[in-house]
Image (cartoon, rainbow, N blue to C red):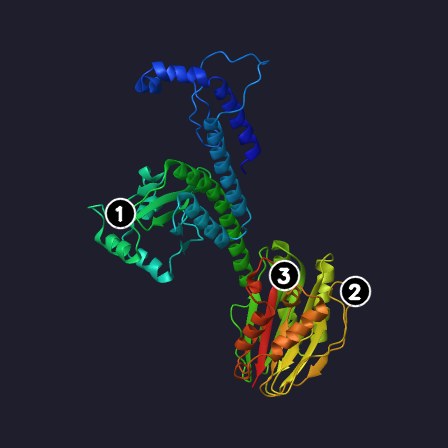
């Protein structure tokens, strides 16, 4: 991050020295022609943060240290105020960009900040890593989806943005097109789109750095013939280089999250079974680090069905691996003795205690006979199912039991109930409750209210029920937030 205080102190010291010798500089200017003065090889102040103060420094021996310099003149004060203003602007913009923790947020912030720096009203950004490894994105500032579509019809090589994205050698410092419509060799389609959208000039800048490579490009559009001043281009270039490094970090994070989500999905059922008399739907949301929440639905002999949900303590690759082992073990026990949910969970608890003594988990297993509309279930420290129908919306009363791995010998009585025709049994993990941020009693009340508010036409569709509950419990994108909690919903609708 830019250290404004340090840069200001450096400039102040340099300006005071220049002030002390202003008389000598003026004398040199009076007796030396302009061209010769420009060619002189007198030393100059070093560039600070990429900004060249362009203040000549005399080779005259500096005044003794005991001499107290006078106050800076108006010229020095104006230049100092300008430098401080520029550095402060960069500092504020980079601080705002650093505060973004999502790729979409950073891209939008970059577009808006760049527009402010170069004095444009509209812009377009394309994220297209040169490595070919995603993610990729296209977004606009002050441009509708239809207008972005029009711009996309222009041949790529005919636009400054396309030249920058293709990494042509002369685009490293940006491409300025101060009068697009005045160019005789402008591509006809580009001219047509520019007239239709009402822009007459553009400034394109690459999003690239030596460490990150080329990540994409941005272009800002002017309503009239114009171009950013040299200082504006310089500040925009500094900002873009910092933004590129920030985007590179977010892209790596996005890739890691995508990999975690892919692994988590592979550990869960690729499809749900089709059993006469029951319809199934599932929803799963994985946290950014990956968690241990899981679900399963497996056909059993005599057209019966086993339903399971569970949660392994912790997060990250270790929890995901433990979740995969636990789910595979439960499937084996369910095939052997699925009609007795207590036996299934008892075997699972014994396996967990012997193989992973430091691990705890919750689980619920239900043995269903759809033809008879009979459900027998047992839970180990897990949240109770909820039954939703035309005449009721209530939680199934299960016995209080400890999670797996907490007791020397786990066992709890099973519970049997009969869903009526048209009712839906909702199994879920506690991540659905915890992501709300409410206390548990309030979260349970919210879940009950969300299920009760499912529109009647949607109550016969388990997917619609699951979506409504998820959307109501976790509005405004909370179902896809950065929460460490996984979410699982498994809905079974009985005909």
Q: Earlier in the sequence, mark 3 or mark 2?
A: 2
Rendered residue at 43%/24% (across/down): 55
Foreground mark, 3 or 1, reads 1
Q: Quadrant of residue 235?
A: top left
Measure how far apart labels 3 and 1 are at the Cα level: 52 Å
Question: Where is mark 1, residue-wise?
Answer: 180
Above-or-below relation of 380 to 36: below
Secondary structure under badge 3? loop
Q: Is residue 474 visible?
A: yes
Above-or-below relation of 60 to 148: above
Measure how far apart labels 1 and 2 are at the Cα level: 76 Å
Left or right: 488 in relation to 40 = right
Question: Where is mark 3, residue-wise?
Answer: 485
Q: Quadrant of the C terminus?
A: bottom right
Q: Are marks 1 and 2 in contact (CB under 8 Å)?
A: no
Question: Foreground: 434 or 92?
Answer: 92
Rendered residue at 53%/62% (across/down): 266
């Amino acid at each position: 991050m830019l250290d404004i205080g340090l840069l200001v102190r450096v400039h102040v010291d340099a300006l005071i020295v220049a002030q002390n010798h202003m008389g000598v500089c003026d004398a040199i200017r009076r007796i030396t022609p302009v061209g010769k003065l420009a060619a002189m090889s007198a030393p100059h102040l070093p560039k600070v943060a990429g900004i060249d103060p362009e203040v000549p420094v005399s080779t005259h021996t500096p005044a003794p240290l005991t001499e107290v310099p006078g106050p800076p003149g108006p010229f020095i004060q104006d230049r100092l105020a300008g430098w401080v203003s520029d550095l402060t602007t960069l500092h504020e913009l980079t601080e705002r960009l650093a505060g973004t923790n999502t790729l979409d947020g950073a891209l939008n912030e970059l577009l808006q900040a760049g527009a402010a720096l170069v004095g444009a009203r509209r812009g377009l950004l394309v994220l297209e890593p040169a490595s070919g490894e995603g993610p990729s994105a296209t977004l606009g500032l002050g441009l509708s989806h239809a207008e972005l579509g029009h711009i996309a019809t222009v041949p790529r090589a005919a636009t400054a943005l396309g030249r920058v994205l293709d990494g042509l050698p002369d685009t490293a410092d940006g491409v300025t097109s101060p009068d697009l419509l005045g160019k005789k060799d402008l591509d006809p389609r580009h001219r047509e789109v520019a007239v239709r959208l009402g822009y007459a000039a553009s400034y394109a800048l690459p999003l690239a750095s030596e460490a990150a490579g080329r990540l994409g490009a941005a272009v800002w559009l002017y309503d009239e013939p114009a171009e950013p001043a040299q200082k504006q281009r310089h500040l925009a270039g500094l900002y873009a280089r910092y933004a590129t490094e920030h985007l590179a970090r977010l892209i790596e994070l996005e890739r890691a999250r995508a990999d975690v989500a892919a692994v988590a999905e592979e550990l869960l059922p690729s499809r749900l079974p089709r059993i006469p008399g029951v319809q199934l739907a599932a929803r799963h949301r994985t946290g950014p680090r990956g968690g241990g929440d899981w679900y399963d639905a497996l056909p059993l002999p005599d057209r019966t069905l086993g339903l399971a949900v569970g949660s392994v303590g912790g997060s990250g690759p270790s929890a995901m691996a433990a979740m995969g082992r636990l789910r595979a073990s439960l499937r084996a026990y369910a095939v052997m003795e699925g009609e007795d949910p207590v036996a299934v969970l008892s075997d699972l608890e014994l396996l967990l205690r012997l193989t992973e003594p430091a691990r705890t988990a919750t689980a619920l297993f239900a043995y269903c006979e759809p033809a008879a509309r009979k459900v027998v279930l047992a839970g180990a420290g897990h949240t109770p199912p909820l039954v939703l129908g035309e005449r009721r919306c209530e939680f199934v009363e299960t016995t209080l039991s400890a999670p797996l791995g907490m007791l020397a010998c786990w066992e709890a009585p099973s519970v049997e109930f009969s869903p009526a025709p048209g009712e839906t049994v909702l199994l879920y993990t506690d991540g659905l409750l915890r992501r709300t941020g409410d206390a548990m009693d309030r979260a349970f009340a919210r879940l009950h209210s969300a299920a009760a508010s499912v529109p009647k036409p949607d109550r016969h569709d388990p997917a619609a029920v699951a979506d409504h509950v998820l959307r109501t419990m976790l509005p405004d994108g909370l179902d896809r937030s950065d929460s460490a909690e996984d979410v699982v919903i498994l809905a079974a609708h009985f005909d």
